[in-house]
Image (spheres, rainbow, N blue to C red):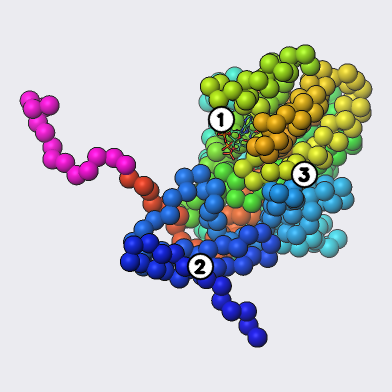
Amino acid sequence: MAEPKKTATLSFGNTSIELPILTPTAGPDVIDIRKLYGEGEVFTYDPGFTSTAACDSAITYIDGDLGELLYRGYPIEQLADKSHHLEVCFLLLYGELPNAAQMEDFERRVTRHTMVHEQIHNFFRGFRRDSHPMATMVGVVGALSAFYHDSLDISDPWHREVAAIRMIAKLPTIAAMAYKYSIGQPFVYPRNSLDYASNFLHMCFAVPCEDYVVQPALAKAMDRIMMLHADHEQNASTSTVRLAGSSGANPFACIAAGIACLWGPAHGGANQACLEMLREIGTVDRIPEYIKRAKDKNDPFRLMGFGHRVYKNFDPRAKVMKESADEVLDLLGVHNNETLKVAKELERIALQDDYFVEKKLYPNVDFYSGIILEAMGFPTSMFTPIFAVSRTIGWISQWKEMIGDPTQKIGRPRQLYIGQPRRDYVGVDHR
Ligand code: SDX
């Protein structure tokens, strides 16, 4: 017998409305309020979307209490251990792990789109050398729609497919160009003989004067960082991409909007802010001073890389990242790294402190990533661009899922108006 339809009854004044309850594959039930305003002439109010599901999606699932993250059902720990970023891109985009032939074809298609139009080089010349690479990336990625007119018709599945491949392929190239431009070195072209992560490291660190051989262990660490950052359900930047896409904006413009949102220190900018914080703390003996500040309501200081809207347990990505930090620093012969020492001691102290325990504040994905990236030779300004490169597949997969949904509508939230009631204009002589 079919399950009886579950409903919620909302009663206020003389009104009582039956609202359907939707049951997900995993996670909390969802009360469908779509007819609420039509029948009850009331809005719901949830400014930070703390209790609001903005869409349905089959791509990524997070259980904040368990500290669980699944990409198309596969646990992040297993993917980080057994998969690689381009295979995760295929999984997120198409929903299943590829067989060997599919993987080879996907890698070939991505590889052949890694170059950017030669005129795009000119865009960089308009920026100051000391521009933050995220500023350059927002500008250049948004400008891609001026070049690739054959993948802008979002109603055409083939255009959507080509735009997705182009974005996956070109973001590493653009991020590497932003880095090279910021240090006054010439751009390095992608090399089709290199894997995705090695190609990115080569474009960042090679110079024309000599051969540059990417260390396989560093490429593996870079690839793992990319996998860990690939998608994270409806986070702020993904929601930005979805909202921009809901108006029919072209995919390049939507990804540029996502990059802009990711830049904020409360979101993807936290990896840069976290390393700068660890550097400012400097030594283990100064940690109590900063813990005190983080707990002080009158001090805006927060522990960067700590806390999360969804995770009220360890961020599973932070656990993998912490192990990777030890491996990379060991590989690079970086022992007694003071920053890592401060990070580990800060984590240990915070996780014993009632404030952090009660508020369920744990290290998140941004807490250890900067230590690895700095050890690899990246400046802090490149941390968030690398997050953007990694998250491109998540953004484009979520965008594609939304645009492919025949019931999709433009996102248009309402508000709780607290401004002036209607009033008449008063001439300047009477004010
Ligand atoms: C990412 O959403 C995602 O999935 C994002 C992300 C992804 O992959 O896309 O996971 C990537 O953005 C990770 C988060 C990176 N940001 C930071 O590390 C910045 C520092 N953390 C915070 O600013 C904060 O924790 C947020 C923004 C991450 C989450 O903020 P919420 O959910 O809005 O929680 P909140 O600000 O309401 O905090 C709840 C309480 C508050 O105290 P009370 O007002 O209840 O007394 O916890 C406190 C906060 O003051 N708190 C912190 C804190 N984070 C929250 N106190 C000190 N240090 C912190 N880091």
Camera-side residue of 260 and 366:
366
Question: Is label 1 within 8 A of ligand 1 (CB to nearest ligand atom)?
Answer: no
On residue 135, which mark appears?
1
Q: What amino acid is labelled 1 in the image?
A: Ala
Q: CA distance from mark 2 to mark 1?
A: 46 Å
Which three-letter amino acid code belongs to the residue tagged 2? Answer: Ala
Q: Label 3: how many residues lie within 10 Å, few (<14), some (14-19) or many (20+)?
A: many
Q: SS at mark 1? A: helix
Is residue 323 on the magenta stretch? no
Q: Which residues are magenta?
A: 418-431
Residue under pointer 3? 316
Q: x, y percentage for residue 266?
A: 59, 33
Q: Is residue 424 on the magenta stretch?
A: yes
C-alpha span from label 3 to label 1: 30 Å
Give the quarter of the image for residue 296: top right
Residue at left offset 60%, top offset 63%: 29
Q: Position of residue 203 (x, y in %)?
A: 75, 32
When the figure is inspected, residue 284 is found, relative to residue 17, above or below; the finding is above
Q: Which residue is at a point 91% across and 27% down the rendered structure image?
A: 330
Count of labels shown? 3
Residue under circle 2?
8
Q: Which callout, 3 or 1, points at the residue further toward the start of the chain?
A: 1
Marker disc for residue 248: none
User: Residue 286 occupies which quadrant of the picture?
Assistant: top right
